[in-house]
Amino acid sequence: QTAWLDVDGHLSLIAAFASSKALCNPGIKLPNHRIDTGAIGGMILGMMAVLRRDAIALFPTSGAIPEELQIGREAAIGDITTAAEGGSTLIFAEDRRLGKSSMLLAMTDRVLRDGRDRMALSVDLRDGIADSDVLAATLLTQAGKQGAGTKVKAMTARGKLKRLAPGAATGVRAAGVLLGEQDDAAALGKLVESLAPTDASLRRALLALDAHGRAAGERTVIVLDEAQDLVRWTDSAAVQQEIANTIKRSGSTVNFVFSGSEKSTLLALYEDPKAPLHGLGRRFPLPEIRPDDWYSGLRERFERCGIAIDRNQLQQIVFYSEGHPLRTMLICAHTLDWLFEDSVTVDTADRAIKDAERHPSWSLP
């Protein structure tokens, strides 16, 4: 018989024969593995090792995951990135655990990778963002790490301000108008001060980011995840108004991507005619992952582990998960607990499905 066992952190294909008192009982438990198929011999003829942590990492079941580990999302990631880079304000309202955060992670990575004339700032409002002042400081801190202010400071060095190209000079003057400064040097000095996260208000932060974009020729995309939480802040109306002012400002270099798992609450920010954000931005739908994309993507993952899986078992997994990303990954991760050969069998998939259905995350909305 053969069995996949966890040996010092490895998934190992064991070819065994003969008898062993230590491994003769059905249901024996080894570290991180369960065996219930009967006697397994004790003499190991061979071992094909795959790091278990590496195999598990191919089927992630928590947190935002990078683009290279996402299946069937490439086109959608491209579409949302193009829209964000083009200055559109987007509303990304979907149910929980469908891959929104992973999509946003991939989008921000692409925005930053595509060129030096953009910043991508991403804030989860449930990650310690208690009010608008914390949001402002977080945005400016991220902007500083991405080089905000560096170009501005360079413009003031050694008389460079007088030798700016026409386009750059126009940008500096536009920044000055926004900040209430007519003198170019004073405008740049005020901009550097405004980009400091200390004691920042949201109004100051958004003005600074817009002024920086005009002066440096950079667009800033701000991602606000769990944006529906804005309605719970004591200064909610003022915050929404400042964001709306930024979006509507002529020539604004700042646009937003709003995402949230409380779909009705998030959409109410834009659908209520009395809301400051009403009519601003467009809904970006999250398309379902096509079954064929699941089949090809999952097959590639298993093959990277040295595990064969045929189309029937792939269909079995996707059928029971209903194509839901988290449920699909849960089933696949549990198949690693029930491998007795170097392939996923009907029995392996059945057991993995039953384990996945018992997972607390399976039934979460």
Image (cartoon, rainbow, N blue to C red):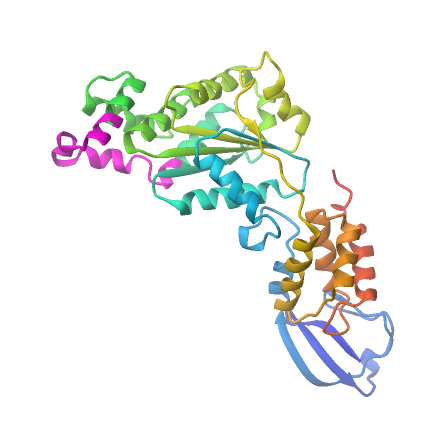
- State yes or no: residue 158 in magenta: yes
Left or right for 280, reference 330: left
Using the rendered image of the protein, determine whether residue 268 is visible from the camera's viewpoint.
yes
Q: List the single residue furthest toward the top.
A: 274
Residue name at image x 47 percent, y 39 percent: 82
Q: Residue at x 72, y 79 (%)?
A: 14
Estimate the x, y position of residue 340 in percent, counting from the top left: 77, 72
Q: Residue at x 48, y 21 (%)?
A: 243
Q: Position of residue 254 (x, y in %)?
A: 41, 28
Prevailing secondary structure class for the magenta stretch in the rendered image: helix
- Residue bounds of the magenta highlight: 143-171
Q: How many marks?
A: 0
Q: x, y (%) of residue 242?
A: 46, 18
Q: Is residue 358 visible?
A: no
Q: Looking at this view, is 38 or 176 the one in front?
A: 176
| Quarter where residue 178 is shown | top left
Q: Can you tell which quarter of the image residue 146 is in?
A: top left
Tell me: residue 20, above or below residue 134.
below
Q: Quick check: 76 above or below 257?
A: below
Q: Position of residue 333 (x, y in %)?
A: 70, 59
Q: Is residue 358 above or below residue 90?
A: below
Question: Which residue does the image show at 62% across and 59% down from the upper left?
Answer: 58
Question: Residue 90: within the magenta?
Answer: no
Q: Nearer the viewer, residue 46 or 322?
A: 322
The quarter of the image holding the C terminus is: top right
Q: Pick the quarter of the image with the N terminus.
A: bottom right
